[in-house]
Amino acid sequence: MHVNDGGLVCLLGPSGCGKTTVLRAMAGFEPIYQGEIRMGEKILSSPGFIEAPEKRQLGMVFQDYALFPHMTVNDNVIFGLRHHSNQEKQAIAKRMLDIVGMLSYARRYPHELSGGQQQRIALARALAPQPKAILLDEPFSNLDVELRKRLSSEVRDILKAEGTTGILVTHDQDEAFALGDHVGVMNEGKILQWDTPFNLYHEPANRFVADFIGQGVFINGQMITPNQIKTEFGIVEADRAYRWKQSDAVEILLRPDDVVYDPKGELHGEITQKAFKGAEIMYTLRLPTGSEILSLFPSHEHFDIGQQVRFRMDIQHVVAFQK
């Protein structure tokens, strides 16, 4: 993987895929046995060599914040500033706390702060030494959903404003997409696709990425022509030509927004599950064939489990994989 100076990237993947190990290796907490970790032209890690963490010019924000409980917020922020005068330390602390919106909390202790406030202090402490890059290890996982959304957006704005390179590790897609210019989807120790959030969703490189990113189900199909696929709900016109042979078995990724409620639609299904999402309701529909698909209906189109509903397919962009 490569990160541009000032870029924000994320490593995204299920638990145990190796993303935190990668971050710890970058930080200098883990040795590596192959390859290199470089910052510019400087080698930070290689087989048999590991630059000390404190010499890497990297900031680290941990999942549990790791603030010192016996120190004030101000003292936590200046803790890593070893080669500055006291006056310089206080000026830096004031600026960092102002950036993260916590200046009025400078004399408080960590236990007097909420989780979101502690996370802001951890970020201010990591930024204070002006590191070349900052590493964030699932920094929002202990926060509630709304706070996570707000804070991840705020952190992105702060890092962009400071021009600080950021590398985030998370298993939360919304977090990765909100923060990352580029996202690497990992599984079993490998990056399967390194791309923009838009491309990961619309152009997944393989079935794992397609299944992991967003919501959807796979429907069986059969190639008829290079851009026509026969399915149980009719022929799907692909917006590209595939090189697979006629009659080859394929799978089509069907997103919830591909299935549109239409009281006059030719297709119908039975509602087996529903999840209210405010402006929309996510329905699970069982087709007459027994297959189940997902659909997002406007929430004013309200149906009960067991009801039959009519719909149509509106697949603007086909994502298919050979079986």
Image (cartoon, rainbow, N blue to C red):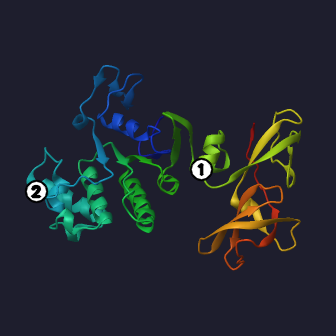
Where residue 306 sits, quadrant-wise, is: bottom right
Residues 323 and 7: in front is: 323
Seen as rendered, the residue at the extreme left is 86
In the rendered view, would you say 307 is above or below 251?
below
Picture residue at 85% right of the left edge, 41% below the top: 222
**In this rendering, position of residue 187 left or right of residue 89:** right
In the rendered view, would you say 268 is above or below 68?
below
Q: Three-letter amino acid code at disc 1? A: Ile
* Residue occupied by mark 1: 213
Crowd class of label 2 (few under 14; some 14 to 19; many from 20; radius 10 Å)? few
Q: Position of residue 9 (x, y in %)?
A: 46, 46
Q: Earlier in the sequence, mark 2 or mark 1?
A: 2
Residues 68 and 263: in front is: 263
Residues 143 and 182: in front is: 143
* Dot 2: element: helix
Q: Position of residue 30 (x, y in %)?
A: 32, 32
* Residue 87 disc label: 2
Disc 2 versus disc 1: nearer the observer: 1
* Residue 266 disc label: none
Q: How many marks?
A: 2
* Dot 1: element: loop
Picture residue at 17% right of the left edge, 54% below the top: 68
Picture residue at 16% right of the left edge, 48% below the top: 81
Where residue 39 sits, quadrant-wise, is: top left
Q: Position of residue 41 (x, y in %)?
A: 37, 28
Q: Three-letter amino acid code at disc 2? A: Gln
In the rendered view, would you say 68 is above or below 108?
above
Q: Position of residue 318 (x, y in %)?
A: 76, 49
Report the quarter where the C terminus lies.
Answer: top right
